[in-house]
Amino acid sequence: MVDGSRESSVRSRQRSRTAMLTRKSSLPVWADAMLRVLFVFFLIGLAVAVHWFDRTGLQDNYDGEVSFLDVVYFTMISITTTGYGDIAPVTERARLFDALIVTPIRVFVVLIFVGTAYNFVLKRTWDKWRMKLLQGNLSGHIVVAGFGVSGQEATKELLERGQDPKSIVVVDKSPDATAAAESMGCTVLSADATRDQTLTDVRVSTAASVIVSAGSDDTSILIVLTVRHLAPDVPISVVVRASDNELLARQAGANNVINPVNFAGLLLAGSCHGEHIADYISDLASVTGRVALAERAIQPEEYGQPMTALKTGVGVRLYRDGQPFGFWQEEAQSMQAGDTVVEIVAGTGTSAEK
């Protein structure tokens, strides 16, 4: 009985996750507007036909005769709710027609006009104003190009590390992806990240760093090329899945190239030589682990000291003039101004190691 209720619960969750199929309209803007106008004329024509069919139920207080032009005139002032009173329905059937047919037509026409004005005028004006406002505040932000599995995990990790979600700009063509990013509080742009205009819109030239995870290596490398063209100095991290493309990604301008397949292989290999190695490496990769990796510049009070004397963590690598040195090498025995250290620090896990 318990298994049956559990299976029912699983099925209900699966049904709740079923997404609706959507497709962007293939009609151009002018065709969409034309269809709306034609539909309005159809509704007006329907109202004119109803009034003309029951014109004997109308009374013209001006000359006593109801012509076709009078019907058109009465229909238009009825739909626009003007109602001068010179022509009015006098029979019960005419009033019933006006209440049950003309009134719904009037509502539809008003909704179509309001919806059209919103879509083609108000919404576009609002979106342009809002984009300019957001662009004006974009500086030192992180651009995430591609919000698939890797992009989402990177964004979640950034948020865990204390990054302000408003300073993360997600670029993706998928409405579902941008909706997911927006639900996290990120700034989003539904567009093609390979286009110059798209990256210009998110002010990539003033970004602190760019994360590229487009889902396919060729697209990711093209995005890296575009970013490097627009922002020669911004740090770029990219995900590639084929080892052959790692060199291409670096040649395109990426500072960091991550291959998740190779990384998974390293974890698997490490687990063969010790059951705790993979667990420790996973902790290092996430700020929510028991330990974490941190990178910082050497402080003045640390000049001349060996890297092993760090009080903030365990130093594992020193960078000097772009060159890496291990803690056992001579260069790491006397830290200097301008050095950068990578150290192991306590993570934010609930059972942080002492």
Image (tube, rainbow, N blue to C red):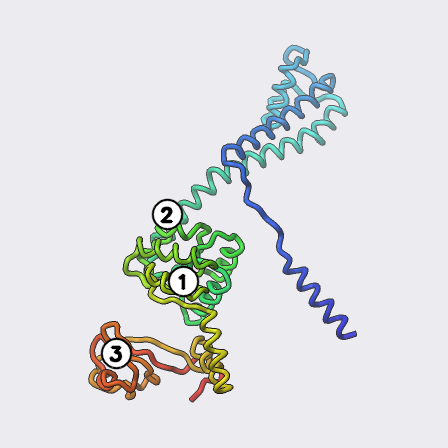
Query: Is 246 rendered above or below residue 19?
Result: below
Q: Residues within 10 Å of mark 3 (few under 14, many from 20)?
A: some
Query: What kind of element bears circle 3?
Result: loop
For residue 146, what is the image quadrant? bottom left
Residue 273 appears in view: yes
Pick whichever of labels 1 and 3 is earlier in the sequence: 1
How far is the residue under mark 1 from the one under mark 3? 34 Å
Query: What kind of element bears circle 2?
Result: helix
Name the disc covering residue 298, or none: 3
Depth check: give the residue in front, 200 or 248.
Answer: 248
Residue 208 appears in view: no
Query: Is 343 rendered above or below residue 38?
Result: below
Name the disc covering residue 245, or none: 1
Q: Is residue 104 left or right of residue 335?
A: right
The residue sitting at 30% across, 85% down in the picture is: 327
Name the disc covering residue 197, or none: 2
Quadrant where the N terminus is found in the figure: bottom right
Q: Where's residue 238, x and y in %?
A: 40, 63
The residue sitting at 26% across, 85% down in the picture is: 329
For residue 32, what is the image quadrant? top right
Q: Where's residue 87, x and y in %?
A: 65, 19
Quadrant where the C terminus is found in the figure: bottom left
Amino acid on which disc 1 is placed: Asn
Q: Is residue 73 left or right of residue 221?
A: right
Q: Is residue 20 left or right of residue 117?
A: right
How far is the residue under mark 2 from the one under mark 1? 26 Å
Pick whichever of labels 2 and 1 is earlier in the sequence: 2
Amino acid on which disc 2 is placed: Gln
